[in-house]
Image: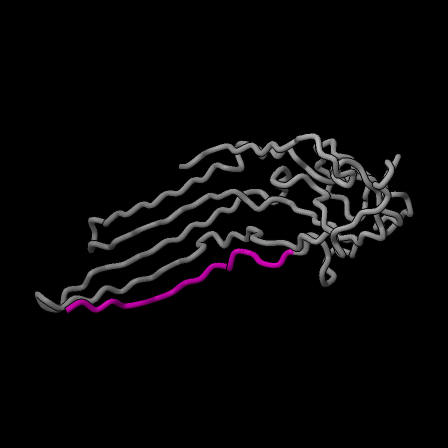
Amino acid sequence: MTAGHEVTNYCVEVNSPQDLFWYSNPSPSATTTSILEFNNNNATNTSSVQGNITPLVNDAAPCYINPPWYQNLQFKMIAVYTLPWWKIKLSANEQNLPSIPLQATYSFKTADVSFLNPAAGHTTLVGCSTCKVEALTPQTIFPFGRDNQLDFRVAKDIFITERWKIEPTADFYNLLNANPILTIGTAYNTSAPGTPGAWRNVTSMLPGRLIKFGVHLDF
C-alpha cells in the first residue's frame, strides 16, 4: 500500500488581467446565449451536467490544487501458494489504483476575449492565436470510481526426467472482468455525449477478461 498527499499553491497577485477575470461572448452553451464568465475564485463544483455552463465552470486559472487524500491511495498485493494436492501452484496479483480525474480544457481565440473594467492598455488579450483554459480545477473531481484488476495463474510442474520438466500454465488476466475507464475526451464542448469528439467520451478502458494457456519446457 502506498499513500501520499500533494498540494499545489501558486496563488500570487499577477498583473495579467486574463488570469484574474475575463469573459467570452457568445457562450459555448448549447441552450443559452449568456455570457460565460471565469473568475479566479477556485470554487469547488462537482456538477457534470452536459452543456450546463453556469454550474460547471468554476475558475479560469486555478492556482490552488488540493486533490482528495484518498486519490493517492494505491493497494497492490501478490500471493503465491502451492496446493498440497498434486503440487498445483496458484498465484494472484491484485491492484486497486486511483481513477483518472475529470478534466475540461476549453479552447478560445483572442478575439473572443474582453475584460471587465479594463484598465488603460489592457483591453485586448494578445500573445496566442488559440488559448486554452481549464474549466475545472485539475485533480479535484473524480467521478469514475477506482481501478481494480485481479490477475490469476494456475501452474503445475511435471517432471519427465531428472533434467527435463514441463510446466503447463493457465493465466487469467482481469479475472473479474472489471471495466474501469482509463482515458476520456478532455476538450470541453457541448456536443451530445457519444458523438465523435464530445467531452467526456470514453477513449479507452481496461481490456476485458483474457485467458491464456501456455507450456514451459525446462531442460
In this orientation, which residue lies closer to the viewer: 170 or 93?
A: 93
Q: Does the magenta stretch include residue 91?
A: no
- The image's colour scheme reads one colour
* Residue stretch rendered in magenta on the structure: 202-219
Q: Is residue 203 magenta?
A: yes
Please identify the quadrant where the C terminus is shown: bottom left
In this orientation, which residue lies closer to the viewer: 176 or 45?
A: 45
Q: How many labels does the image show?
A: 0
From the viewer's perspective, is residue 92 above or below residue 63?
A: below
- Residue drawn at the location 51% of the way across and 59% of the way down: 207
For the view shown, which residue lies furthest in the front direction?
A: 121
Please identify the quadrant where the N terminus is shown: top left
In this orientation, which residue lies closer to the viewer: 57 or 112?
A: 112
- Residue drawn at the location 89% of the way across and 49% of the way down: 26
- Residue drawn at the location 64% of the way across and 56% of the way down: 202
From the viewer's perspective, is residue 87 above or below residue 134?
A: below
Q: Does the magenta stretch mainly form a helix, a strand or a loop?
A: strand
Q: Is residue 69 left or right of residue 167?
A: right
For the view shown, which residue lies furthest in the right direction?
A: 33
- x and y percentages locating residue 89 in the rendered image: 25, 53
- x and y percentages locating residue 29 in the rendered image: 84, 49
- Residue drawn at the location 63% of the way across and 37% of the way down: 140
- x and y percentages locating residue 69 in the rendered image: 53, 31
- x and y percentages locating residue 38 in the rendered image: 79, 39
Q: Is residue 9 left or right of residue 109?
A: left
Q: Is residue 148 left or right of residue 126?
A: left
For the view shown, which residue lies furthest in the left direction?
A: 162
